[in-house]
Image (cartoon, rainbow, N blue to C red):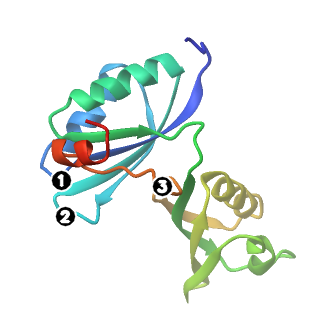
């Protein structure tokens, strides 16, 4: 079934926490000419595993093919394309801004967003932002429009599905017990 159109894909990958694993995953996208919009990787509840969340754009057919090829990589344990499925997505950002000297205050610009002031020094304020990528884009646009943005560091998306669906290592024994083997 071909969709034909490009769309945003949010993909979570469980992989071995080994040297070179990230390079192999990123290389698969690079070989196919796909840009990775955001990439976030960190350890999981199991220190031998890492969870990689990436956001890319492509047709459904091509991204499905890449997901199947990801599963063939020796370090990849599981792949979950969350596109179209219910999931929670969040991004962390550190935003350095000039303190307001004009009509619009920083507090007014930050209203409605999950921001926390981390420090104030040298006429600059360092904020921590937590929210969706879309909310972060809107917040940054407000700060830029006010001429206050000095520096921005974004984490990229992290995601998780609600309920029982999990991204986990599944041994043959675990899959048989769960009726999947």
Measured as percent of width and height from the top left, residue 119 is found at 53, 86
Q: Position of residue 177 (x, y in %)?
A: 25, 48
Q: Identify the residue under disc 2.
A: 47
Q: CA distance from mark 1 to mark 3?
A: 19 Å
Q: Residue furthest right?
A: 103
Q: Residue at x 14, y 35 (%)?
A: 74
Residue 160 - label: 3
In what quadrant of the picture does the C terminus appear?
A: top left
Q: Earlier in the sequence, mark 1 or mark 3?
A: 1
Report the residue at 30% width, 41% height from top.
78
Question: Could you classify mark 2 by the number of other residues whose Cα lies within 10 Å: few (under 14), some (14-19), or many (20 or more)?
Answer: few
Label 1, secondary structure: give it. Answer: loop
- Nearest to the observer: residue 38 or residue 118: 38
Residue at x 69% of width, y 68% of height: 148
Q: Which residue is mark 1?
A: 17
Q: Earlier in the sequence, mark 3 or mark 2?
A: 2
Left or right? Give the position of 165 relative to 133.
left
């Amino acid at each position: 079934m071909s969709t034909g159109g490009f769309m945003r894909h949010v993909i979570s990958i469980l992989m071995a926490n080994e040297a070179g694993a990230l390079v192999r995953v990123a290389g698969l996208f690079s070989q196919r000419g796909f840009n990775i919009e955001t990439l976030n990787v960190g350890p999981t509840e199991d220190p031998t595993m890492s969870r990689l969340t990436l956001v890319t754009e492509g047709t459904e057919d091509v991204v499905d093919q890449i997901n199947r090829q990801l599963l063939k990589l020796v370090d990849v344990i599981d792949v979950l394309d969350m596109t179209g499925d219910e999931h929670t997505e969040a991004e962390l950002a550190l935003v350095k801004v000039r303190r307001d000297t004009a009509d619009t205050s920083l507090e007014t610009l930050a209203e409605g967003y999950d921001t926390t002031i981390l420090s104030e020094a040298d006429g600059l304020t360092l904020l921590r932002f937590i929210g969706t990528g879309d909310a972060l884009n809107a917040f940054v646009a407000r700060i830029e429009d006010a001429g206050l943005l000095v520096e921005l560091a974004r984490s990229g998306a992290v995601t998780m599905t609600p309920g029982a669906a999990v991204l986990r290592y599944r041994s043959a024994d675990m899959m048989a017990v769960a009726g999947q083997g």
